[in-house]
Image (cartoon, rainbow, N blue to C red):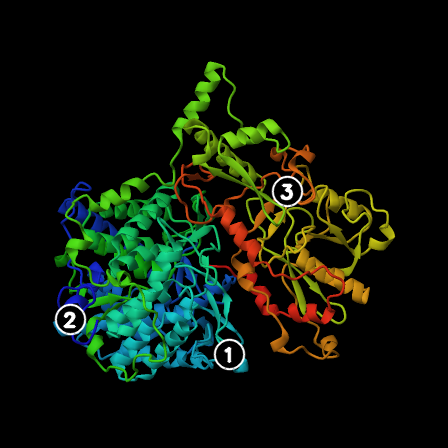
Amino acid sequence: MSEAGGCRGCGSPVPQRAPWSLVATTAALCLVTATSVWTAGAAPMSREEKQKLGNQVLEMFDHAYGNYMEHAYPADELMPLTCRGRVRGQEPSRGDVDDALGKFSLTLIDSLDTLVVLNKTKEFEDAVRKVLRDVNLDNDVVVSVFETNIRVLGGLLGGHSLAIMLKEKGEHMQWYNDELLQMAKQLGYKLLPAFNTTSGLPYPRINLKFGIRKPEARTGTETDTCTACAGTLILEFAALSRFTGATIFEEYARKALDFLWEKRQRSSNLVGVTINIHTGDWVRKDSGVGAGIDSYYEYLLKAYVLLGDDSFLERFNTHYDAIMRYISQPPLLLDVHIHKPMLNARTWMDALLAFFPGLQVLKGDIRPAIETHEMLYQVIKKHNFLPEAFTTDFRVHWAQHPLRPEFAESTYFLYKATGDPYYLEVGKTLIENLNKYARVPCGFAAMKDVRTGSHEDRMDSFFLAEMFKYLYLLYADKEDIIFDIEDYIFTTEAHLLPLWLSTTNQSASKKNTTSEYIELDDSNFDWTCPNTQILFPNDPLYAQSIREPLKNVVDKSCPRGIIRVEESFRSGAKPPLRARDFMATNPEHLEILKKMGVSLIHLKDGRVQLVQHAIQAASSIDAEDGLRFMQEMIELSSQQQKEQQLPPRAVQIVSHPFFGRVVLTAGPAQFGLDLSKHKETRGFVASSKPYNGCSELTNPEAVMGKIALIQRGQCMFAEKARNIQNAGAIGGIVIDDNEGSSSDTAPLFQMAGDGKDTDDIKIPMLFLFSKEGSIILDAIREYEEVEVLLSDKAKDRDPEMESEEQPFSENDSQNQSTDQLTSGSQEVDLGDQESPEESSLNSHPESLSAAAADDAASVSPSEQNSNPPENHEPASLDGECTDLDNQLQEQSETEEDSNPNVSWGKKDQPIDSILADWNEDIEAFEMMEKDEL
């Protein structure tokens, strides 16, 4: 909004304060609250029932908060299964999750403003006294800058905001004299050293006592941070500046946001997940609205609301246009590559994107908000909770659920924007599931696995900071809250900051004039300040009409297809072709596939992809048969995979003149020695004879005690492993026989077994594409003796040996793209035989159901990952009827076109060129396993 109070999309200027006062409840700019208007879509909920549910939320909060105070305080968090506090250093490390813990009574601080929202003013006053008396911010502990900002700094500022509000009312907190604000200022100064980088992006971690880089700090060596980590500071830091008059906090946060904006990918206007804080290079180039990016977008829009700076709105609208153009595939939100935004980066979604419908309400784009929220609700109804990650066909990808509040947040905002009582029923489901499945005697326990209902000894502070706040506000009427919540804006941790900060102690920071804003179609801004008559058509069933087509999106079945099969059996007719009976060498089967509209596409990496085009089927019944066949094929392929996917492995060349500088990305095997559980395998390499390893080796003396190199093709992977193991090899590397294939352009896959017991295979086996394998082969031709290290991740280089060599210039090296390593989908190759360039389908008698063929239609859910257009039917594990991705063939063609025109297998390629091309940082490779929430 401009200073004059005008608003794009509004019919006339409005007073500046008017739209701001609506943010906390409706969360829609310039949007008049529509509460109690659209009630025809669901039965109205009585005032008595709303009060009953509100009281139930209060009781649940008392159960969680009371047990924390009784069993855990002053520890940071409650461990609800063992009824004790979680203290950093006294419990086994949980990795990055523990970076939120700083020995500063995290849950108490995070809950301060929740106590006031729930009208527990006496408890709030007691809690503030405890914080002032007991909390120490000068602890020798390394904490996350991001988590400490949103939870602790935000909690202190939210507590201060409501403390001065209560003091002004004259009933409570009369003794309060900005003590929480002084603590917030102290913490703010402790976080400032993290911004000591050339880019202005903060280090991801800081020591509360010693800061950054000092030996005793034990931090300051990190090079990367997530986009959300650097871009979710402006609300808290600007509020601290406005409250205290110290402009330095807002200035630092603005500089970080400015840098991220400058580093956006200019053609797509998207940002990646992880960025180098020193160079500004994108480390992970996948982009979405979930983990790692989520609150960056949220804070751009909310910074405009709180601070009134048009530049933040322009940036948000530019990003939002890109999100809706590339990432939004209603009702799904799928990550894409920032440089190739039409190419999906993964086939699953994470739970953190559940906040996005709420942000779309704030934007005023209601329809996609309703669609995505409904899809998420269907997933919740299937699993009781939203899994940490789930696939595009709604299977569980990561089964944990740490009681995240983002879905409740979006439910609250959608209810306030639509007034549809349906969302009250959604909230009721959340309350019932929490009490039924997560409630334990000492609080509420996170779900370790939503499929089994198993618990984890964990109750995060955000559960009290956000979940109960949003659920209570969902059922509260205006008179149930002791202050006007419309005078505040929610931070990403649901802490409340007063909107009057927009005119207080304004920073001298000016709009970034160095940025060139992209001229967009005016329609991109239509929803900035919508007219309510346009936003909500004169139809009381508006929201219901959007939800209706999605109500069975997760569990949808295909009854006509099932009936068709049953009737065919009863009539004695020949049943349709089943996936388990399909043989790629059977001409009759191929003809049946054609009749069902199923075609086979040969991919460059050696696999064959099945795609169904329903419009090409001979009849509607044949199209249904094709859909069922595709669904069975997906399930059959999935059964070949182990439940737990294995991460990529590393092949590191450690001999002269490489000394560990060359690290090759390798695919794992589902058999043999597990490198993640055992020590790495190190040895010299030797080629096996025969090179395909499909029979007893004729040169056992050459591979004895070495790592055998074998070529893909002509037999099963497990058979190759047994043959080289019998010859005395200590490990094996299978090199792809498709010339030019590379992990840069093709997804890694796991080498599967042969359907038999593979416990007899004791050596590690890894797979290299042709490009990576050629590097080892060329090194052998150049140096004869080549030693490699097979491991789960790259090891430190040998500095003593490396010092003997002249180091390579950084300008001459080409870093390997780590976004392929971290977010690229893994394919499970069901077997191994010749590539399609060398053999036809008719030349191999193996059946696909026996998992024997590379070339026989290796279908996996990761291949169903793009926009679903009409008349294309995908194969879905759960049996739902969804639209097929018609871009599968286009995607494979795109990948082929993107392959570099370099012959990696030629003998005359200089080894120096290979070394320079693969002189990548070890740290970058280690990032491949850190694709975490």
The residue lying at 56 percent from left, 49 percent from top is 645
Indicate which disc, 1 or 2, sits on the residue closer to the N terminus: 2
Indicate which disc, 1 or 3, sits on the residue closer to the N terminus: 1
Labels 3 & 2 near each other (Cβ < 8 A)? no
The residue lying at 52 percent from left, 73 percent from top is 223
Q: Secondary structure at mark 1?
A: helix
Q: Secondary structure at mark 3?
A: loop
Indicate which disc, 3 or 2, sits on the residue closer to the N terminus: 2
* Residue 176 position (above or below residue 478): below
Q: Is residue 718 left or right of residue 829?
A: right
Depth order, front residue of 782/590? 590
Q: Which mark is residue 289?
A: none
Labels 1 & 3 near each other (Cβ < 8 A)? no
Q: Amino acid at mark 3?
A: Asp
Labels 1 & 2 near each other (Cβ < 8 A)? no
* Residue 555 position (above or below residue 307): above
* Residue 184 position (above or below residue 620): below
Residue 382: horizontal and vertical position, in percent?
38, 41
Category of crowding for the residue at label 1, using alpha-carbon neighbours closer than 10 angstroms: few (below 14), some (14–19), many (at least 20):
some
Q: Which is in the foreground here, disc 1 or disc 3?
A: 3
> Which residue does the numbered mark 1 point to in the structure image?
217
> Which residue does the numbered mark 2 point to in the structure image?
17
Residue 679 seen: no
Depth order, front residue of 450/786? 786
CA gap between label 1 and label 3 equals 52 Å
> Which residue does the numbered mark 3 point to in the structure image?
854
Depth order, front residue of 324/23? 324
The residue lying at 53 percent from left, 32 percent from top is 593
